[in-house]
Image (cartoon, rainbow, N blue to C red):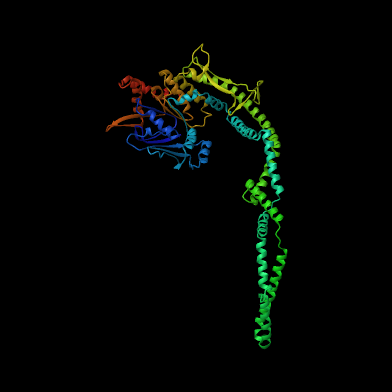
Amino acid sequence: MIKEIRIRNFAIIENLAVSFEKGLNVLTGETGAGKSIIIDALNLLLGGRADTDSIRSGESTAFVEGIFEVIDPTTLDLIRESGIEIEEGELLVKRQVSNSGKNRCLLNDSPVTVSTLAKIGDRLVDLHGQHDHQTLLHPEVHVDLLDLHGKSTDLRNEFLQNFTEYQAQSKKLESMKMDEQERIQKEEFLSFQLKEIDEAGLSKEEEEEIKAESNKLKHAEKIRAGLEKSQSLLTDNQGSIVENLGQVLKELEAIHDVDPSLSETVERSRSAYYELEEVVESLRSYNQSLEFNPSRLEEIEDRLAEINGLKRKYGADIAEILTRRDQIAEELDQLASNDENMKELEEKLKQQEKVIAKLAIQLAEKRETTAKKITKSIEKELKELSMVNVRFGVRFDYPPSPDGFILFRKEKMKATPTGLGTLEFLFSPNPGEEMRPLVKIASGGEVSRVMLALKSILSDQDTIPVMIFDEVDTGIGGGVAEKVGIKLKKVAKNKQVFCITHSPQIAGLASSHFRIEKQIKEKRTRSSIRQLEHEERVEELARMSSGETITEASLEHAREMLQPANHRGR
């Protein structure tokens, strides 16, 4: 329920705070006093559209706050799933609209998106404004109301879950069903690529090895010239390095006989001489093995060209080429198993179709049964609202479809997210008139009473704890208004009901009566609200009955309307 609302700088409301009670709360006041503004502010609080035009003139920001008592477990779960902490079932909702565009939504002081606020708001309050009740004129709403009355929600949710999964799997199958020729062409192309890489026989080390060999072959003559020059310097010439070092060794060995302290120097010289001899042998051996082989160089160049060609196609280096090779092999495996996967998915979809068909038929049959019950209940409620000759009905439309997989009454049909076909409420207000869609023939007052009748019979199933009717008495007279008030009083036994009304008959049945007033002070218009005490209610009902001139007779009539014995809705 709504425990309290605070409004600042919204339209002509400067600063307003009001607490509400359970039962039937009515709001009255002269035209233009701001009754609908309060509904607009509440609509903003529940996630409605923010409009800077609603900010009070001269101000930069409008604020609307509300305290709600929440006891429904589903609503509490939704709030907690949105990341909002809620204790003892109390929810503080704040909405701020600013000229700067910095609008804010807060739940228990935690920021939320407008969509989150609207989703939660839909479960807090059922608001039927002066024109909002015309949502009843949208046929897509009728199926929701019928399922609510028939307690088909669980069955419908089960159907929707299966139907949604079926649609997702169907899309997956369609994406798998590529053109067969295209699939074959892709498979052939990938096979060619795989063969090309595999036949190359690549290894990660090969490229560096053959590059080194290529470089050696390209510079073979230069290498041979260097080797020969080195050999010549070491051995070939008179006084070569080896010859001179050998002479040094002889001289030192002779001195060593005289001076043994030179033994280390002699050994080092001998070691150097032997080392040089090994170098000479190594150079000679390498020179003998070295040859310029044009055919081998050509072979290496061809191999490097092959590797570079593969790089251009498959990767920057051999490691990347081999990685791409594994990816191609995996794609080929997937293509090879595509037919098998498609067959498995097709079989799965056939099984899902059986489940969906069964649920859809059960849902359709249950709705038809519910339609008979709701028709009688609404006609009974409308008769109590002085619509004696009214007829109400539900029309079902099941368009056949050759592509459908659901066989219903010997016709193939397609499923929709709500089940089979469509349905629409029909209405005939006068004897002799055929029933036609509610949207086409019902007047504003009639639609208001149909909505009230629906809400009366759905009040036990509907978990939304607050209902607001803005001028539900539009287009109806005093006698009917009293019956509307009695009906509202009945609904208010299980819910908190708000009603903005011009009818004293409805206002007289309220549990709590609030008057909205407009004052002009310092050339500024301000709207205020206050709860009326008993005598103030008498005066307000008298004013509503007779206008500005309040007579003793109108006061006496007002007192009679407030007598408990006359509150037949209690």
In this rendering, the answer to whether 386 lies above or below 312 is above
The percent position of residue 21, horizontal first and vertical second, equals 42, 33
Residue positioned most to the front:
238
Q: In the displayed structure, does residue 477 sit left or right of residue 228?
A: left
Residue found farthest to the bottom: 258
**161 displayed left or right of 292:** left
**Does residue 556 appear left or right of residue 349 in this picture?**
left
In the displayed structure image, the side of residue 144 where residue 259 appears, left or right: right
For the view shown, which residue lies furthest in the left direction? 522
Any part of residue 568 in sight: no
Q: Which quarter of the picture shows residue 313? A: top right
* Front residue of 533 and 266: 266
Q: Is residue 90 visible?
A: yes
Q: Position of residue 456 (x, y in %)?
A: 50, 25
Q: Residue sitting at 49 percent across and 23 percent down?
A: 137
Q: Where in the figure is residue 30, as x and y percent of width and height? A: 34, 25
Give 557 or 162, whichever is nearer the viewer.
Answer: 162
- Which of these two is toward me, 374 or 64? 64
Q: Residue furthest top?
A: 432
Q: Quadrant of the C terminus?
A: top left
Q: Quadrant of residue 501?
A: top left
